[in-house]
């Protein structure tokens, strides 16, 4: 087995896994509630929209909108977005107030794998967001859960994330456990924190890995400049992924990945860090995509990362029963494997 250490985990701490609020996609365009003023000094030599994005931790598009609407000043004056800053110039941001979001019940079909009075396990389809956030106010898993469970969901994570203990990305399919009581929520969160919850994924990745199995131990945090992305960075949160090659093809590999920790985009970031990004990943995938493998009409129009949360195991937080669930590979994943096995994509 190969163990890969990307860089030293400078934090020295093992922080809580997969708890809501850590995903930059949830808040990249929405500064902290109550942050009516953000002050700082310009680094200098950068465009104002770049300085603003870095200072506020928002996307460049959002920074440009704030500048155009007069919410950003330099030395007390409104400047254009392409203004080149001087080192030390005082910047003042007065972001517009946040739009209040509200989760409402919506009759959206759910594939429920298990349910009792304390929790339920659902098989989330690809394309479904887990909870409401800016740009995804409805049609989420939470909206569907509210219709199915009514008021019987844990309230620990607030009105926008009732019952949500951990998450998977919009374009990742697979298993999630949802808490219906606060006691269940706390027990499940503790298992995530202690790494005793089993979570295994399957993915198709670019290229052929040098080792049949191994471990990636490399800290993950926000990308230093692309604030909606995550990256392996010094001082990031401890992140450990164990992988195994299930099947190899000329240009791709089918791998299984077991999470020891559960950071935002962990598998996608770690596989890209190894040089084998997940097939179809629009954020961390290769640029440009290899033309010999990804031409239109060759079955590779995936519309998102080829990643599936296949196995979920944990101890029932109330009854103490050992539970383990498996979700079969979705149709698009199986179709891609069939094409790879036939040589159609070699």
Image (spheres, grey):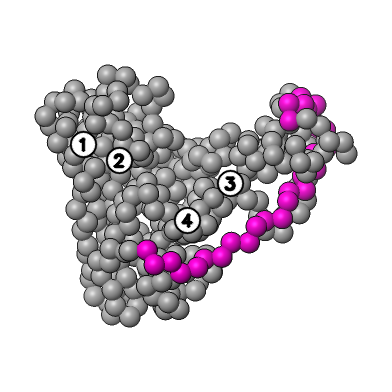
* Mark 4 closeness class: few <14, some 14–19, many ≥20 residues within 10 Å: some
The residue lying toward the viewer, choosing from 183 and 2, is 183
Q: Secondary structure at mark 2?
A: loop
Q: Secondary structure at mark 3?
A: loop
Q: Which residue is mark 1?
A: 336
- Which portion, as a residue range, is magenta? 81-108
Q: CA distance from mark 4 to mark 1?
A: 36 Å
Name the front one of labels 4 and 1. 1
Residue 31, can we see it? yes
The x and y percentages for residue 2 are 26, 36
Query: Quadrant location of the C terminus?
Result: top left
Q: Are marks 2 and 1 in contact (CB under 8 Å)?
A: yes
Q: Earlier in the sequence, mark 4 or mark 1?
A: 4
Name the front one of labels 1 and 3. 1
Q: Which residue is mark 4?
A: 15
Q: CA distance from mark 1 to mark 3?
A: 33 Å
The residue lying toward the viewer, choosing from 257 and 304, is 304
Residue 250, can we see it? no
Q: Which residue is mark 2?
A: 306
Q: CA distance from mark 2 to mark 3?
A: 24 Å
The x and y percentages for residue 89 are 83, 33
Q: Secondary structure at mark 1?
A: helix
Q: Residue at x 72, y 55 (%)?
A: 97
Q: Earlier in the sequence, mark 2 or mark 3?
A: 3
Q: Residue at x 69, y 36 (%)?
A: 64
Q: Which residue is mark 3?
A: 28
Q: Earlier in the sequence, mark 2 or mark 1?
A: 2
Q: Secondary structure at mark 4?
A: loop
Q: Earlier in the sequence, mark 2 or mark 4?
A: 4
């Amino acid at each position: 087995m190969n163990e890969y250490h990307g860089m030293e985990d400078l934090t020295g701490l093992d922080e809580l896994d997969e708890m809501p609020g850590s995903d930059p996609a949830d808040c990249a365009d929405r500064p902290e509630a109550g942050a009516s003023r953000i002050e700082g000094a310009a680094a200098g030599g950068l465009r104002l929209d770049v300085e603003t994005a870095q200072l506020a931790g928002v996307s460049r598009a959002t920074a440009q909108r704030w500048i155009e609407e007069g919410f950003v000043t330099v030395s007390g004056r409104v400047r254009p977005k392409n203004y080149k800053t001087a080192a030390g110039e005082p910047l003042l941001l007065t972001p517009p107030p946040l739009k209040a979001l509200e989760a409402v019940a919506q009759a959206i079909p759910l594939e429920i794998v298990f349910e009792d009075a304390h929790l339920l396990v659902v098989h989330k389809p690809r394309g479904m967001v887990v909870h409401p956030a800016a740009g995804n106010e409805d049609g989420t898993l939470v909206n569907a859960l509210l219709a199915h469970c009514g008021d019987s969901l844990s309230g620990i994570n607030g009105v926008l994330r009732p019952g949500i203990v951990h998450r998977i990305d919009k374009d990742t399919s697979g298993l999630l456990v949802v808490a219906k009581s606060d006691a269940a929520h706390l027990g499940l969160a503790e298992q995530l924190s202690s790494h005793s919850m089993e979570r295994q994924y399957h993915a198709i990745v670019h290229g052929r890995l040098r080792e049949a199995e191994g471990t990636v131990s490399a800290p993950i945090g926000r990308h230093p400049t692309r604030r909606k992305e995550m990256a392996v960075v010094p001082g990031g949160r401890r992140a450990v992924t164990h992988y195994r090659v299930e099947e190899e093809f000329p240009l791709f590999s089918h791998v299984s990945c077991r999470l020891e920790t559960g950071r935002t985009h962990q598998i996608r970031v770690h596989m890209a860090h190894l040089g084998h990004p997940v097939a179809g990943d629009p954020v961390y995938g290769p640029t440009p995509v290899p033309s010999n493998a990804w031409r239109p009409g060759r079955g590779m129009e995936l519309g998102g990362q080829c990643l599936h949360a296949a196995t979920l195991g944990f101890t029932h937080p109330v009854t103490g029963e050992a539970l383990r669930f498996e979700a079969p590979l979705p149709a698009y994943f199986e179709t891609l494997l069939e094409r790879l096995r036939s040589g159609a994509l070699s």
